Image (cartoon, helix red, strand yellow):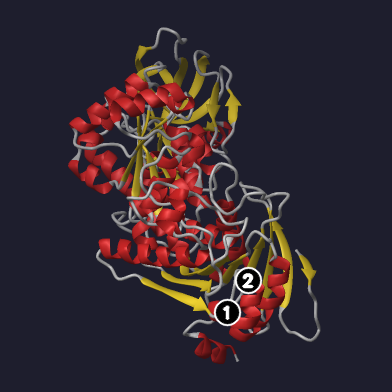
Amino acid sequence: MTTAFETQLASAKWTFSTRRVDRTLATGMDTAFEKARPGELILAYVSEIGQHRRVQLESGRHSDIYPGDAVVLACGARYAPDQFEGLAEILPKSADLLAGGGCIGRMVARNERIKQATRLIPEGRLLRADGAALNLDDFAVRVSARGDRIPVIAVFGTAMNSGKTVATAQLALGLRRAGWRVAALKGTGTGAFGDFNEYRDTGAHVVADFTDAGMVSTYREPLERVRAGINRLLAHAEDAGCEIAVLEIADGLFQRETAQLLADPAFQRRISGLVFACGDAVAAAGGVAEMRRHGVTPDVLTGMLSCSPMASAEALGATGVPVLGKNDLSDPAEANAFALRSGAEWRSAA
Amino acid sequence: MELEFEAPTTDSTVKRINIATQAGPLATFVITPRRMVSSRPLVVLHGISRNARSLVRHFRAEAEHSGRLIVLPHFTASHWPHFQRPGHPARADQALVELLNRLAIRFPDCGGRVDLVGHSGGAQLAHRTAMLYPQRIARLSLVAAGWYCLPDMSMPYPYGLGESNTRSAALWIRRKQAGLAAYLELEIRVYVGSRDTERDPALRVSSALDDRQGRNRHDRARTYVDAVRAAAHGHGRVADIALIELPGCGHDFELAITEAGLARMVAETSDMTPALAAAG
């Protein structure tokens, strides 16, 4: 006989960030929201539509949401200068939809050009049979490899929307065209299917993001955890026989976790290629200077600036780093050069 | 796939396939021997005469003899007015790589290293493709290329890998430099007719080319071999390259096959006998 709880869960909209969760393990709820930790699963009801009018479903499509809809999301923080900053905190009476991919928390800052966050009323934390809160971390991809062998081409950018995802996807496409078995990975950010689907459309052999490593968002997570998540994704790629990985690091160079990774000697040693997406030539000059301050120099610049021959010439002049457009990155000859420079080992066309 | 060249007197089959690639559609003849062994496929690139169909007849016997899959792309004039040099007008290199990727689905050996042979314009495409994707090539056989991209930093692109003001030079130099070390490790065989000394209308002529590579295909082949040896030496290696002169031959590929046995030379491998024995 179906219980009311099971009916609630069955009728809820399970968001993209919860896609790995085994729903049958959810056997109850509590309302100890003060104990909520990042990654814990929350059943909530939509109370007031604001910025987000839709959520991203685990199936990979959007769903409009209406007041009264039940949604399952993960508690998490959000860093999005063009939208919200939010913390992984749930107040009992009301919470905010921080990201349509399925991130619930408390908004603390908002870009003045956007609406208030869509408001949610938390119903409960989902619990296992033993009373422990269900957490995305419980469903992280299982790996056997160590993730320390596969060459990694990292993609950084000056800011959100500077062209990192396009660069990541197009380079993965070029590598796949050249015959490499490639993984397209997103190492940091907030869970959403837009980038994930863009990667998948390239035919990359493995596509994964930090939600596959058990985090709804990497914002405000300790560097060790972020690094461990990235290693898990790389191990997943190795387990799947990938020969090379393209790894997008979200947001701009000054974002907390991005800056920590950039400055991290272990991370620097781990990457064997570096692509930097920039909006314009000034951003390129500043970004490259910041990278060089940390002892690294990008192999190429790309992003919005590559659309403009004049901006590209200015960036090349200011930095000495060549500029490539998205069609260059998806060119198998260019991508193959990345693979060879990174020491990728050819096994067989994938 | 459509079947062509069916001949009950031979056991191999020839299929003509058309594949869609990002660079354009590519027709290809695929010769499958009756007793196919697990061995490196052989890819044969025609020259400017685009005589892939004629070459099929010559290489069919080699497929039977060697047990190897032999692949002959056909760069038709309508789709590939330029195919010798990867660049802005045409990207035959992309089409070749995509062809191998597609063939690998049915013939897994195409996913590993293949032997690549090219004649004249096909030799130009072959060595430039090998520079870009050296990991996909085992043995590179170049027959009478008109001119070369030398692994020589002192010679401006496109004749070498030195800086140049030509269109997109920096892009192509960077790409080829990335694969240079692996390219210099390839087994390379360079064939040229002893009488291939004509400066015919198809031969590219310029003072820079004449001065640095030689005045004809025969001399340019020798220059290329010397340049590869020097570049490998610069990388601390000994190049596996040899120049084979075809006595009495001019520039005609088919005559070199019928009179000098060129098809057999490029198709034979050292491990062929045991492989064929294993195949029964």
Could you tell me how far apart the alpha carbons at marks 2 and 1 are, in whole angstroms?
A: 13 Å
Locate residue B144, reporting x and y percent. Answer: 54, 66
Q: Report the front residue among A283 and B178.
A: B178
Residue sitting at x 18%, y 42%: A265
Residue B253: mark: 2
Locate residue A73, reporting x and y percent. Answer: 45, 30
Residue B248: mark: 1
Q: Taking A314 as reference, is A19 above or below it? A: below
Q: Taking B204 as reference, is B255 above or below it? A: below
Q: Taking A56 as reference, is A109 above or below it? A: above
Q: Quadrant of residue B188?
A: bottom left
Q: Taking A174 as reference, is A101 above or below it? A: above
Crowd rating for badge 1 (residues with CA inside 10 Å; few <14, some 14–19, many 20+): few
Tell me: A33 left or right of A192. left
Q: Chain of mark 2?
A: B
Locate residue A50, reporting x and y percent. Answer: 50, 13
Residue sitting at x 39%, y 34%: A216
Crowd rating for badge 2 (residues with CA inside 10 Å; few <14, some 14–19, many 20+): many
Inspect this view and state whether residue A242 appears.
no
Q: Chain of mark 1?
A: B
Dot 1: element: loop
Q: Say whether disc 2 or disc 1 marks the residue closer to the N-terminus.
A: 1
| Kind of residue sitting beneath label 2 | Phe
Which quarter shows the N terminus of chain A? top right
Residue sitting at x 65%, y 67%: B72
**Residue occupying the far top of the picture:** A112
Tell me: B194 left or right of A237. right
| Kind of residue sitting beneath label 1 | Gly
Residue sitting at x 34%, y 70%: B239
Q: Report the front residue among B37 and B29.
A: B29
